[in-house]
Image (tube, rainbow, N blue to C red):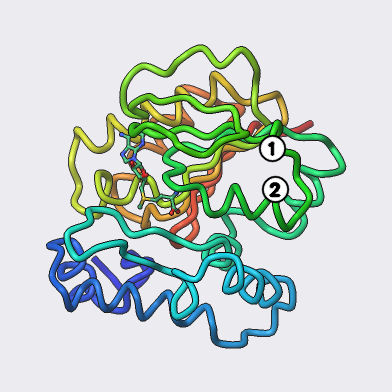
Amino acid sequence: MNAIELGSFRSMDDFRLCEFGNSKGRAALLRRGREVLDGHGDKFIEMVRGLERVDFPEFRASAVYLPTSTSEYFLFSPSWYFRHRLLTENIVADIKMGNRQILSVGSGPAYLERFLVERLGICADQITLSDKEPISQNGFNAFTFDMYGAWPYFGRNFDYILFPQSTFLSLNFHENAERQAHLHNLIENSLEWITEAGQVRICGEPNTQNIFAVKERLEAGHPDLEISCDDDLITCSRKTG
Ligand SMILES: C[S@@+](CC[C@H](N)C(=O)[O-])C[C@H]1O[C@@H](n2cnc3c(N)ncnc32)[C@H](O)[C@@H]1O
């Protein structure tokens, strides 16, 4: 595995430590969260970072947060997702101007989704939350299901299906047929529910042989599909024209 394949991590050690839940590995991820604080010239992301520090005290010190030392999941702030291009300022404008529908899979406490509504002017009825755990946020459409299993009937198509850091733990680096089947299944299911011009956007899935194997398989089954794998963001959409 080379440096590029390590995605968010600085070294193989960072990744392995994090994978094994070691405190040093956790510290490495929190350190990456703190880097969102550093100025990097993007005014929009800096604005998001400023607002989320007011709205969500848990993200004051770092854009990544671990609720308790025994928690399985890290939680991620809105600026983390803009920094990693799960969403961009242009996509937010498109969602607002085009009245687009979003499905967020593995939304957890929905920091990003609440921020879109409370700070960026998107209507709650444009967002559908989903998770394998019960969802406690009011005001949103919500579904509870296992994204690796059968998907429910949503009754509508979506312009954006987002996976905000929800695939990482189960689909990480090691090449593995079961992981490839899971990733393939969740993209196939997403394709059933996106609009003609819709996009699937998966954040937190580092570049690995698993992704490239699935990309090949999807492209063979869907010649009209455009798939890009760039660091830890995967996007899928249908070719236009
Ligand atoms: C790392 S947390 C991220 C939560 C939230 N998106 C955030 O950014 O803070 C991963 C989320 O994915 C959910 N998840 C994990 N496996 C899942 C599955 N098989 N089906 C649906 N949701 C899943 C977890 O319950 C958790 O809420």
Seen from the viewer's position, the closer of residues 216 and 83 is 83
- Residue at left offset 61%, top offset 12%: 155
Q: Is 92 placed above or below 19 here?
A: above
Find residue 175 and report its horizontal and vertical position in percent: 20, 47
**Element at label 1:** helix
Q: Quadrant of the N terminus?
A: bottom left
Find residue 116 and report its horizontal and vertical position in percent: 67, 51
Residue 51 in the figure: left or right of residue 71 = right
Q: Is 227 placed above or below 91 here?
A: above
Q: Quadrant of the C terminus?
A: top right
Q: Is 140 placed above or below 164 here?
A: above
Seen from the viewer's position, the closer of residues 31 and 209 is 31
- Quarter assignment of residue 158: top right
Q: What amino acid is at disc 1? A: Ala
Mark 1 touches mark 2? (CB < 8 Å): yes
- What number is the disc on residue 124? 1
- Residue at left offset 41%, top offset 52%: 165
- What number is the disc on residue 117? 2
Q: Is 226 placed above or below 147 here?
A: below
Find residue 236 and report its horizontal and vertical position in percent: 56, 39
